[in-house]
Image: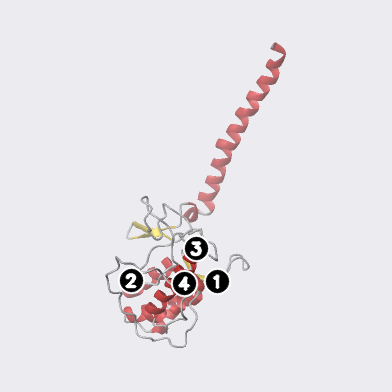
Amino acid sequence: MRRYLPELGIAVRITVLMMLATGLIYPLLVTGAAQALFHDRANGSLVKQNGQIIGSSLIGQNWTSDTYFHGRPSATLNSSGTPEPDNAASSSASNLGPTNPALILAVEQNADAVRCLEGLPPGPPPLVTPAPDASATATPAPCAPVTQPNVSQVPVDAVTNSGSGLDPDISIDYAELQVERVATARNLSPQVVQQIVNDHILDRQFGVLGERRVNVFDLNLALDQLSSR
C-alpha cells in the first residue's frame, strides 16, 4: 500500500492544480478580458432608458403596435406550456419538419396575417386548410386596404420562426415591407422612416457571415427618439 502513496500524492496535487487552473484562474481571466474588451456585450447588450433597463439588443421582443416594426414569429412557451412569443426564459423552436402540415398551415396563416396588416393583395389558395373551430365566435379584424399592390412575395423571415424563438433581427426586405404602415401610424413620411431603416442596416459579420439585417429593437428605439423631438 505504501508504494502507491507517492502516486496518490501526485494524483491529488494534479487534481488540485487542474481545479485551480480550469475552475478559478481560467474563468477569472476570460471574465476579466470580456469585461475589459467587450463590457456591454459581456453583460448581455442591455439597453437602458432613463436609467432603467428596457431590454437587450440580443433578444427579440413581441412588438404588436402598428407604430412599431414587428419581429419574426416566435414559438416560445411560458411555464404552463401556453404560447408566449419571445419569452427569453424558454428559448425554443417549433421543431416541426418542412413537410409537417402544422408547419405549412402556420406559415400560410402568418403570411395571410402579414398581407392583411401590411396592405398587400391576397395570396394564393392555401395548401392546408385548418379544421373548423366550433369555439371560435370572434369576428376577425378587417384587413388594411391594399396599399402595396405591386408586392407579391412575403419575406420568409416574416412567416417562419427562428431557431431560438428570440431572434432580434429581421431581413431588410421585411423591414422595408413595414415602412408604409409604420409611417402612416406615426404620421411620418415613408421617406423619413425608410431613412431610419437605412441607417440601422447591419452588414454581414466580418463581411462574410450571415446576411445583412436590421435589429428591430434598435430600429424601434430610434423611431421613439425621433417622435420625442
Choose the circle earlier in sequence order: 1 or 4.
4
In the shown orientation, is residue 13 left or right of residue 191? Answer: right
Element type where label 3 sits in the image:
loop
Residue at horizontal 54%, vertical 53%? 37
Residue 163 in the figure: left or right of residue 188: right
Q: Are marks 1 and 4 in contact (CB under 8 Å)?
A: no
Inter-mark Cα distance, 1 to 3: 16 Å
Tell me, for residue 225, which label it has, or none. Answer: none
How packed mark 4 is, by other alpha carbons closer than 10 Å (few <14, some 14-19, many 20 or more), is some
| Residue kind at label 3, given as amino acid type | Ser
Task: Kindly report which numbered mark, 1 or 3, lies closer to the viewer in this rendering.
Answer: 3
Considering only order in the chain, which callout, 3 or 2, is on the residue closer to the N terminus?
Answer: 2
Earlier sequence position, callout 1 versus callout 3: 3
The secondary structure type at the circle numbered 1 is loop
| 95 on left or right of 80 | right
For residue 60, above or below residue 42: below
Amino acid bearing label 2: Ser
Q: Residue at image x 50%, y 80%?
A: 153
Question: What residue is shown with label 4?
Answer: 128
Q: Which mark is residue 162?
A: 3
Which percent across, then down, holds residue 191? 42, 84
Residue under circle 2?
Answer: 65
| Dot 2: element | loop
Image quadrant where one finds the C terminus? bottom left
The residues bearing labels 2 and 3 have C-alpha atoms spaced at a distance of: 21 Å
Q: On the image, numbered disc 1 is attached to which residue?
A: 212
The image quadrant where one finds the N terminus is top right
Determine the CA span between mark 4 and mark 2. 29 Å
Closer to viewer: mark 2 or mark 1: 2
Q: Nearer the viewer, mark 2 or mark 3?
A: 3
